[in-house]
Image: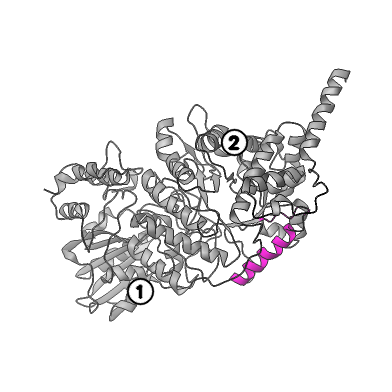
Amino acid sequence: MRPRLRLAALGAVAALTLAVIPASAGTRMDTPAYLDAGQPVERRVADLLSRMTLADKIGQMTQAERAAVTGDPALVTRWRLGSVLSGGGSAPTPNTPDSWAAMVGELQKAALATPLKIPLLYGVDAVHGHGNVPGATVFPHNLGLGATRDSALVEKVYRATAGEMRATGIPWDFAPCVCVTRDERWGRSYESFGEDPNLVARLGGSAVDGLQRNGVVATVKHFAGDGDTTYGTGDSGYPIDQGVTVTGRDDFERLSLAPYTAAVQRHGVWSVMPSFSSAGLTGSPVKMHANRELITGALKEKLGFDGFVISDWEAIHQLPPDAPAGTPEPTAAQVRAAVNAGVDMFMEPATAALFQENLEAEVRAGRVPIDRIDDAVTRILRVKFRLGLFENPFPASGPVGTAEHRALARDAVAASQVLLKNTGGLLPLRRDARIYVAGRNADDIGSQSGGWTVDWQGRNGNTIPGTTILDGIRSMASSVTFSADASAPVQAGDVGVVVVGETPYAEGFGDVGATPWKHGTAEQREPKSLDLQPSDRAVVDKVCGAVSSCVVLIVSGRPQVITGQLGRIDALVASWLPGSEGAGVADVLFGTKPFTGRLPVSWPSSAGQVPVNVGDETYQPLFPYGWGLHTGDKDTRAHAVDRVAAGAAPAGWQSMIADAEAATEAGDPTRAEALLSPLTP
């Protein structure tokens, strides 16, 4: 090398060395500032960062899965891990609160054995209660909570979730999902609060508050546009999941970014997870994990987000590898692209060591600036200090599934039920009526809980403690006959209650048209569809054709097309995925509580009509966004719905109801009243 170049290279090496060598603590013998809880968070962060080596910093940016380290917790120390997670269905043995707390405690001991004693964050997907642990309270999935329109209730649900997480030693939740679902063929639709960004922003913010005000880090996900991808553009073999959001910048900000603006600026969320999907706003689609314009530009700089960005499960492995075929992933190029885009912590379940090796090489080569590393680590440490993790690193086990939390879940279930049709005021039912219950989802707590319940994709069957819908009906009615397939004879005067719908699924495999999950039960391997399964249609036809009065409950994570059978059905209820407390369904069926739920998504008249959303130029769903008959006190909207149900519906009534509901969510009650005025003369 020429002397001038040699001196320049040596200067660069010296600068890098100074950046990564820990600052001397000097001769003072007092407690370092970062260990002094009385110091401001930002001073503690700066002090700790100044003492960290490059290995310490990269360790904080790394998250491994429990299966990779529980057999040898010393790996946590060696890799200086900032975090460990449990993927869906990954649990200690036995799967009890005590076992969870003990496992987290052992991993925490290993983290505190590092030179700077930085505690780790343990994270899980507790997306509808702490469903990872049998016996925990399983609440309705977000779509059901969206039907309640009740932000205070949502905050209570997530507060209870935080309590049960802490009872197992876990302070970080990969929730809530603040996606805006715009195509119900997407298998994650039930993780959304609805199709209106204002509704999602309001309830998503309440979920953040419920977690973070009660000692658990919230993660809003999946940034951004995952609910608005185009069918047929999916990745990893899925039809729509992980696909491309094809839209203009204005619509992207209005639909996809709005909930993040609220979560960051009004609720101070501490963690954000990018989506597997891509956004094509100004040319070719860019994977979100490499999208610097949106992660750094929009989220961090424009919105002012000061927490940290956590990647999704091996998500950077989907970025261009820029390496020979067969090169182990993540490759150096994948790591470099994501770090420079603004991702701060990396979910590398089984490849933590490779990630660290590649990141260190990229930093030393100057392709990832040390300032970017320091920014990432600053954000991670800031959250750990805010959480109080340095003062209270060790978990303490406690009860889950408490009576108080189950009562709350039952209330949430009742509030989530949407009465779509009620001919002749059939509902609520009389307790002395003879009830004939049929349908495969009447006595299946696994199906009524859906995905992300103990297993990643969930399981139908007797999977968790709780009450099924049939249990709830039996607790209310004096005479109940149950026949899942409707093979038992029907007696004169019986009131039929048919409970049908979907079997559990989660991301990817839940997409309509997706290849079935091969590890699921036989029922889970049925084709995913917006149409009721043939066996469900047969039971509806058989029972509703034999009884004088027929109620149909649809237990599902999204609308199911029922148009062809609607004429035979006297009362129709969208029950969503109620979770462990099926008795809440019986509460509204028998009038203990009124029906108050409203549709969080438009209910299509046919599968071919999807996507259909409030605000569409042509909008004629079977039931519009905001629809829901009420059996208690009624406001203007409820009277308008009653009038339409009675047959007094002018042309365009669907848009009137849906647009009025959207106006209400936008904070414009005057416009909402005006839109409803033709329906309430």
Q: Please provide percent x and percent y for residue 316.
A: 62, 41
Residue 231 appears in the figure: no
Q: Which image quadrant is residue 21 in? A: top right
Left or right? Give the position of 330 relative to 551.
right
Mark 1 surroundings: few (<14), some (14-19) or many (≥20) residues within 10 A: many
Left or right? Give the position of 473 relative to 324.
left
Where is 118 relative to 277, above or below? below
Q: Which image quadrant is residue 266 in? A: top left
Instruction: State the residue position of label 2.
Output: 290
Secondary structure category for the residue under label 1: helix
Instruction: State the residue position of label 1.
Output: 472
Give whichever of 427, 224 is nearer the camera: 224
Report the residue at 76% width, 42% height from top: 54
Left or right? Give the position of 472 relative to 133.
left
Q: Does the segment drawn in magenta span residue 113?
A: yes
Where is 176 relative to 582, above or below? above
Q: Which residues are magenta?
A: 95-120
Left or right? Give the position of 552 relative to 145.
left
Where is 470 relative to 254, above or below? below
Which label belongs to residue 571? none
